[in-house]
Amino acid sequence: MQFIDEARISVKAGDGGNGVISFRREKFIPKGGPDGGNGGNGGSVIIHADRQLNTLLDYRYQRIYQAQRGENGRGKNQYGKYGEDIHLGVPCGTIIKNAETNEVLADLTNNGEEVIIAKGGKGGKGNAEFATSTNQAPRVAEQGTKGEKQELLLELKLLADVGLVGFPNAGKSTLISVLSAARPKIADYPFTTLIPNLGIVRVGEGKNFTMADIPGLIEGAHLGKGLGIQFLRHIERTKVLVFLIESTSQNIKEDYEILLGELREYSKSLIDKPRIVAITKMDIADTEIRKRVKKIKIGQRIQVVPISAVTNDGIKVLVEQMWKLVRRNA
């Protein structure tokens, strides 16, 4: 299935039905009183979060959604039928914005959570509602009110405990494929990952966490360079960040600072998250590189873990560290 994390749609709630002017007319009652019924309310547009969904793809093919109009009232005090609501499902983690003002209207993170995004119009009153002791034959009825209309921007942010961050080809996809059942495309060239991947890492009985792998970042990503910028939103909700840097890098610390700088420029909240630095591809590191990696210190509280997703070296330690931080920041 194609991964789509942004869509623009138009929604329109149903208009309320009109009230009617009517008078009771029966064989032996030539001048009966008013019996015009009220119009029915229009249907609303309701958006709900559904954990069975993982993409906004459907909203790329259909952009306009309209709820049913309320029926007009009828004589004999018959009320018009209410218009049916429209229910639109989106993945958990979807933010709904007003496309014109960018105002956040709802943030649906939990399964079953819902919001009335466009309210149906109210049905108009029939003339029976206007009868009084001084006006027993009112010849007036209300029009139904218009249903609300919205131009919406849907943005999906994956809900994951751990987010993997790194340059292209740093080994993120390989790691998530080793730790979970996710099967991302893997190859030995940059920008293999073109979409975010989500996997569940099982630590033990009843212990697991979710991990997101986003396309690799390059210097200047926050300005739109490369592919990563359009997917950085997917690590905004994560509890823990894991920076993946190749062991063969000429300057591991400098690479780390570049990645950290890109996150800072995108959103300062990202650099407040607890993080781990994983030095990848240790299976191809020579003796000199191994010595250099062993000496690396990045801050007092940041764990540096050398790993190889090919030989599984360091993987257990990394998973334990991730689980520890996930639990601490739950």
Image (cartoon, rainbow, N blue to C red):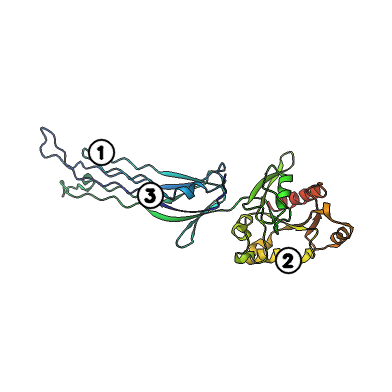
Q: Quadrant of the N terminus?
A: top right
Distance, label 3 to label 1, CA atoms, is: 23 Å
Residue type at tag 2: Glu
Image side of residue 43 versus residue 195, left or right: left
Please name whichever residue, 256 or 329, is drawn nearer the observer in this view of the structure: 256
Q: Amino acid at mark 3?
A: Ala
Of the numbered discs 1 and 2, the one sitting upstream in the chain is: 1
User: According to the image, label 1 marks what residue?
Assistant: 78
**Which numbered disc covers residue 257?**
2
- Residue for point 65% across, 47% down: 198
- Which sits earlier in the primary sequence, circle 2 or circle 3? 3
Instruction: Determine which residue is flagged by label 3.
Output: 13
Residue type for callout 1? Gln
How far across and down, in percent of the image, does residue 301 sit?
78, 61
Dot 2 surroundings within 10 Å: few (below 14), some, or many (20 or more)? few
Residues under labels 1 and 2: Cα distance?
71 Å
